[in-house]
DNA sequence: TGCTTATATCGTAACGATTACTAATTATAA
DNA sequence: TTATAATTAGTAATCGTTACGATATAAGCA
C-alpha cells in the first residue's frame, strides 16, 4: 500500500486527521528515511513544500506520529531529539555505530540480541519490548585519514 | 587505595586540584554509587555537607570528572543528564533494564557483547571503544502487581 | 445554507536544563 | 608581600521544548 494512504488510515483509526501540514511533514520523513532528523531539520526541509508551516506544528506532529508508533523518538545526547520512521519489518532493532572521528552514525538493521532477550526473561524475569544498542568507536578508514577532531566527553547515546 | 586519595591523584596528574567543593561532590557520588544521579540531585545532596556550594560548580565539576573518566555522563531521555562513577573493573559495560511499569532502572554489570565487538571489527572495520545497551520492557513481578501506569512515548534512552 | 462545536494551526511567551560570563576568592610562585 | 593563575559564586544568556491564546479550518446538525 502507498505509505501516505497507510499512514492516513492509521490517523483515521485514532480519530486524527492527516492535514496538509501533517502530510507535508510525513513526506519529509519518507523522503529522508535513512536519516535521523531533528525537529529543526524537519522544519527546514518541510519549508520547501509548505513554507508557512510553524515550528510548534512540527513538534506536535512528531509527537503525534510517535504516539501512533509511526516514528520513533531517539535521544543521542547531542542536545536534540531525533526522529525515525519505524518500518513495519524491523519494529524494534536499533543498533548504531557512532564514529568518534567523523561523527558518522550508521544504523544496523539486524537483530543480534534475541538470545540475550530470552536470557533476560529467564534470569531476570524481564520481558523485553524494545531495545537499543549503540557502539561508540572509530572506523578504521577514519583513523587512517583523520577527518576531524575527536568529540568531547559524551555518553554513548 | 582510599578512593578519595586515588581521585585526588588523578586530579593532580592533570594539574587540577581537589578543592573542598570538588571533594564534597565526589563524596556524594561515592555515597550513592548505585544510583545515576542528575545534576540537581547531586546539588541537593551536596548541600548537606557543603551548604554554600553553587549549582554551576556542580556542573563544572561533573564535567571535569567526566573529562578525567572518573564519572560517566549518561542521557536517558528524561530531560536531564545523569552521572555515574565508573569503577576500574568494568570500564565500559553499560547494560540497563528499564521497566515500563514502575520506571525502575537496573544496571547489569556483565559484558555480553565482546563477540559482537569482534564481529564489528571484522565486518564493518569499526573499532569499538565504548558501548551501551538498554532494554525496555516489563518485569513480570510488576506486570502482576501493576504498580503504576505506563509512561508516554519515549525512546529507550 | 448557517450555526455550533471540536480540532488544528500559528506565533510567541514561558519553561527548564545547561552554559557563559563577571566579579570575588583562594591558592601558588616568585 | 605581590603578582599570577585557578576556582568559585551568582546570575544572565542560550537553546531546545512546551504551553498558551487567538485564529482558522473542518465536521455535525438543524
Image (cartoon, coloured by chain):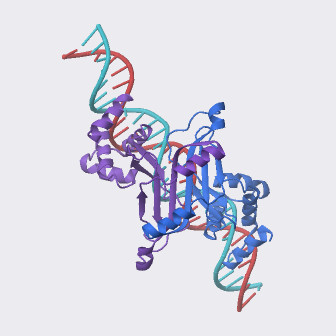
Chain colours: A purple, B blue, C red, D cyan
Residue A43 seen in the current view:
yes
Instruction: Please provide percent x and percent y for residue B145.
Output: 66, 31
The quarter of the image holding the N terminus of chain B is bottom right
Above or below, B117 against B100 in this view is below
* In front of the other: C23 or B131: B131
Instruction: Please provide percent x and percent y for residue C6.
Output: 39, 23
* In front of the other: C12 or A57: A57
Residue drawn at 35 percent across, 33 percent down: A11
Residue B76 seen in the current view:
no
Residue drawn at 61 percent across, 44 percent down: A121
Residue drawn at 42 percent across, 40 percent down: A69
Decide if residue B138 is on the left or right side of residue A37. Answer: right
Above or below, B6 against A42 in this view is below
* In front of the other: B26 or A55: B26
The picture quadrant where one finds residue B50 is: bottom right
Residue furthest out toward the right: B2
* In front of the other: A142 or B57: A142
Instruction: Please provide percent x and percent y for residue D27.
Output: 30, 22
Residue drawn at 57 percent across, 51 percent down: A116
Instruction: Please provide percent x and percent y for residue B61.
Output: 66, 65
Q: How many labels does the image show?
A: 0
Amino acid at each position: 500500500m502507498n505509505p501516505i494512504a497507510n499512514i492516513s488510515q492509521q490517523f483515521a483509526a485514532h480519530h486524527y486527521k492527516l492535514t496538509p501540514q501533517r502530510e507535508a511533514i510525513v513526506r519529509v520523513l519518507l523522503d529522508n528515511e535513512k536519516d535521523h532528523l531533528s525537529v529543526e531539520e524537519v522544519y527546514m526541509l518541510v519549508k520547501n513544500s509548505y513554507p508557512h508551516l510553524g515550528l510548534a506544528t512540527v513538534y506536535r506532529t512528531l509527537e503525534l506520529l510517535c504516539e501512533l508508533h509511526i516514528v520513533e523518538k531517539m535521544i543521542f545526547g547531542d542536545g536534540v531529539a531525533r526522529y525515525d520512521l519505524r518500518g513495519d519489518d524491523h519494529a524494534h532493532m536499533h543498533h548504531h555505530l557512532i564514529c568518534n572521528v567523523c561523527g558518522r552514525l550508521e544504523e544496523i538493521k539486524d537483530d543480534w540480541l534475541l538470545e540475550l532477550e530470552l536470557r533476560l526473561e529467564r534470569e531476570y524475569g524481564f520481558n523485553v519490548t524494545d531495545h537499543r544498542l549503540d557502539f561508540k568507536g572509530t572506523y578504521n578508514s577514519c583513523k587512517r585519514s583523520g577527518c576531524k577532531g575527536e568529540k568531547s566527553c559524551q555518553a554513548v547515546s
